[in-house]
Amino acid sequence: MSSTKFILGCFDDPDNMMHGIENLQKNSIPIYDVYTPMPIHGIEAKLGVKESRLGYAAFCFGCLGGSVIFSILYYTLVHDWPMNVGGKPHFAMPNFVPFTFEWTILFAAFGMVFTFYAATHLFPGRAPRVMDLRATDDRFVIAVDAKGNVPHDDITRLLQEAGAVEVKHNERKYVSYE
Amino acid sequence: MSTHQHSFNERFEFAGKAKTLSLVGIVIGIVGVLAGFFGGEEGIQNTFSNLLLSSYYFVGVCVAGVFFLAYQYMAQSGWSVAFLRIPQAFAKTLVFAAITLLIVVAAGLLVHHEEVLEGHKVSAPYLYAHWATKGLTDPKSEIYDKIITGKSAFLNLPFFYGTLIVLLGLYSLFGRLLVKYSNSEDVLGGMLNYNKSFKISAIFLVIFGFTFPIYSFGAVMSLEAHWFSTMFGWYNLAAVHVSGLAVIALTLIILKQNGYFEWVNESHMQDLGKLIFGFSIFWTYVWFAQFFLTWYANMPEESVYFYKRWEPEYKWWFWLNIILNFLAPLLLLMKNNDKRSLNRMKFAAIIIIIGHWLDYYLMIMPGTIKKEHMFNLVEFAQDMAIFAGFAGLFSFLMLSTLSKFESLVPKKHPLLEESLHHHIY
């Protein structure tokens, strides 16, 4: 049993990388993930990446923001300390609209950013988790989980056939940890 | 997906059902106008108000075509190239719409009727009676009105009508230029015409942005000349824009369902849907801003506008306006898949088109007609007939313009390939 944890196929050309994905998929080898320095068109469909659920997070945070400010407004302006502003009723709905609108947007926007950070380990100050440093520069990397995917030589061969300039057998998942 | 799969030389053929329906619409409209003119004074008033409403809507949709073209060129956006012919057809139709509006306004100003104003019998025009009635600005007159006199630098016949002619002429001119450049681009190729379009779009957007409020202040806001709202121009711009986008989407979908524009894909629909969704929210934003400022300040000369629209005969329409133009697009177009579905988009576009008719109805009618019931079948039938007439006129002129284009896509537009491969998640 080798101590290889991940097999990385590094490509210098996105088309070759797409070809590598096809090769692996044809041989029913599950792909852990793919790292590219730029967005590759159509790669989500090819890898079967599920549609982002960020929109649902945005919706929930928006609802939260709207409810929070509405409660604050209601408590301060209607319940706790009603004031007469221009002869308007204390519970004057049009007054509430701008605040509710803005807080809904504020919470939705910040909530989406933080959800995204949380989901991708990108919080500021945290060392990014990277499998291969050149994936952020000029290499297109296919990562295959080595455990249960044997024999490793076949995977290496498939990646090389597709035009991988380098195939790495890494013993640890990330080259950088926090 | 490559270019040669599509036959770009295919032209739109304007015949059959589309032509018949357009002509039927025009006939219904003519019947509606004639019936109104034989319907006594109130019938004539209703006809004039409806003619103004529909021709303002007509101009608005066509202007939105020019506006759409201009900001697409200005943003150098590629996605819209696939269906750019549709707003181009709108832009070319604008000159007819402008002439229609000018005729309606002129007729409304020229045809007078007896009216009792503050106990004095006056001869008031059917449209713009609040400022165009003779004597309002004459200090010796019995109906002298100080407020109107103060506004007479803007609200006097030569300036008012001249502004309309100049502005509509300018918008039509820019629309035609953008179409002309696109057509010669198809012949010559190269970047020359694209660069010219970019430049002319920039000039148009500056002119349009500053003058559109003046146009809507004149054409619609001055119907209730004592009232004013500085938000009115933006409010109208939002309405014009979103209803124009809805008409673009509806035209595109109907043509696509009839076998044209097969290169327009789900991503184009989604982007168009996003614009419609976004600008419906924007419409609501400015609508509310106008309402909110008036409500908060609570000054009688401003509140009167909403006071009238809060009367029993308008109150339900007032709320329906918000439901159709805000809630409906919000809920119908929120999800990506909804924007990608042709049928959903078609349904939403129709709702918005109806909704903005109602929006204009609420701008124009309370200041012009005497409405006694919330719903009057005869009146409503006439409203619908005239609307059908203008819908027919618009689709007839627009589709015959579209059929004159050599191809249904600007073949040598530099961003055509980008548009054909447009794909978003």
Image (cartoon, rainbow, N blue to C red):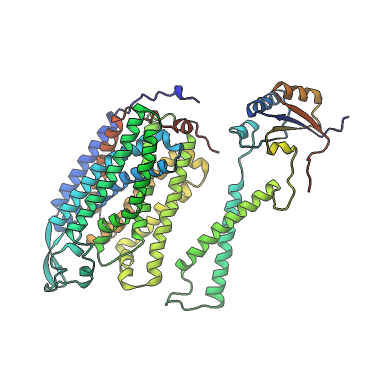
Q: Quadrant of residue B75?
A: top left
Q: Is residue B391 visible?
A: no
Residue in front for this viewpoint, B419 or B374: B419
Up the image or down, A88 lies above or below A21; here it is below
Q: Quadrant of the N terminus of chain A?
A: top right
Residue in front for this viewpoint, A126 or A46: A126
Q: Is residue B174 visible?
A: yes
In the rendering, at what x and y percent does residue B226 appear?
A: 26, 67
Residue located at (31% from left, 30% from top): B405
Residue reaching furthest front? B192
Q: Quadrant of residue A172?
A: top right
In the rendering, at what x and y percent does residue B340 appear?
A: 48, 38
Residue located at (35% from left, 36% from top): B86
In the rendering, at what x and y percent does residue B117 appear?
A: 16, 69
- The mark tally for this picture is 0
Residue in front for this viewpoint, B376 or B42: B42
Residue in front for this viewpoint, B59 or B67: B67
